[in-house]
Image: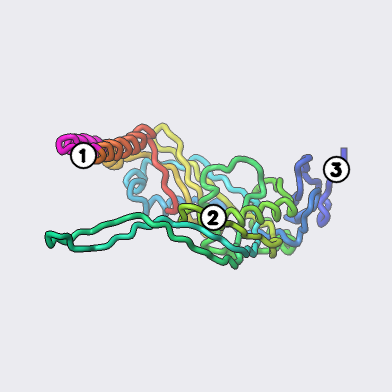
Amino acid sequence: MEVYRCERCGAPLEVSPETIVAVCPYCGYPNHISGNMTVENITLVPSLNKNAVAQAFWRSVEHDFDLKRIKDSIEIVDVEGYYTPYWVGNVHVEGDVDYTVREEECETYTDSQGNTQTRCHTVERHYHDYVDEVLRLIGSARRQIQSFGVDDLVRHYSKTRPDEKPLVELGEGEWERLKLEILNTEIDENQAKLMMREDAIDVIRNRYSSKADRIDRFDVRADEPENVRLVLLPMWTVYYKFENSIYHSVFAGWDGRRVASTEPMSTLRRAEYMGGVALGILIGAIGGAYGAAVSAYALSGIAIGLGSILSGYFGFKVLEGQRVERGG
């Protein structure tokens, strides 16, 4: 069995058949093992340490309307941190899009009896756009199903643009201060570039799908991605206990910002959700009865449907027993 050793310090490396790059746990040097990878293109976003993340958790508790009231009953069970790998790059897209939007057109007129009336009808309007822009894309370098808080972490990274350091330039002392467990990279650079081109086309297509009733022609091309690099993002999870249940909060390691959290449901919050259930029932009952009374059966159906959706949504929240907070 072949033994892999770090190119910088000679320490043994843990390597599996899927390993593309192995980061030395002793000195932090990235070692290319398989696939297409340029180790000079691997960057790391420096992380806070475990104590700083725990302090960030307690600060988030102080600023949370519900958690602040039960602070004395909360106990941190564990704090875990690791670097997750993502491919980042820029993709230039260019092409033509023809699409149709159905719009309501109204006109006001005076009838034969002198009354002002409004007449509306639906028209189809056709548009043509020329697309020419550069998209900054980020995608996971792993194939596993994403865990809670990962999408929120990526969105926060895209907004904050934290400083990055080339991994090959980190000295052993700096690595010792910043090191965390690094999750395996399972997608190499060639695969990442192919996915970025596909994602870039999807971004433009989804943009027009959301605003158009019909896309008549979609001829958009994506160029070869540029400035592609593998970024290691620090993600921390704080597990905490309240009464007999365990909850968790996810933090961005570079600034200690809470990006997602599961929280116990307070009595006040449960009462709010129960009020939502009652409101949904009320809307369905009153609206349905009124619509039936005036023979407006469409209105009756809409009221009953809306009431069912509201009561079902808030009822699910009550049964769930906990709530999810994002971007706190």
Quarter residue 203 falls in? bottom right
What span is colored magenta in the figure?
280-297
Q: Residues within 10 Å of mark 2 (few under 14, many from 20)?
A: few
Residue to which mark 2 is pinned: 216
Residue closest to the eye, 56 or 297: 297
Instruction: Using residue 122 as the reference point, say whether residue 54 is left or right of it.
Output: right
Residue to which mark 1 is pinned: 296
**Disc with the residue nearer the chain's start (3 vs 2):** 3
Question: What is the quadrant of the N terminus in the image?
Answer: top right
Instruction: Using residue 264 as the reference point, say whether residue 109 is left or right of it.
Output: left
Report if residue 174 is visible in the image: no
Between marks 2 and 1, how big is the CA–CA gap? 37 Å
> SS of the residue at dot 2?
strand
Instruction: Please tell me which residue is depicted at 36% across the width and 46% down the height of the picture.
Output: 67
Residue 108 x %, y % = 23, 63
**Disc with the residue nearer the chain's start (3 vs 1):** 3
Residue 315 x %, y % = 32, 34
Residue 167 x %, y % = 71, 60
The question of residue 292 being in magenta is answered with: yes
Q: Main secondary structure of the magenta part?
A: helix
Q: Residues within 10 Å of mark 3 (few under 14, many from 20)?
A: few
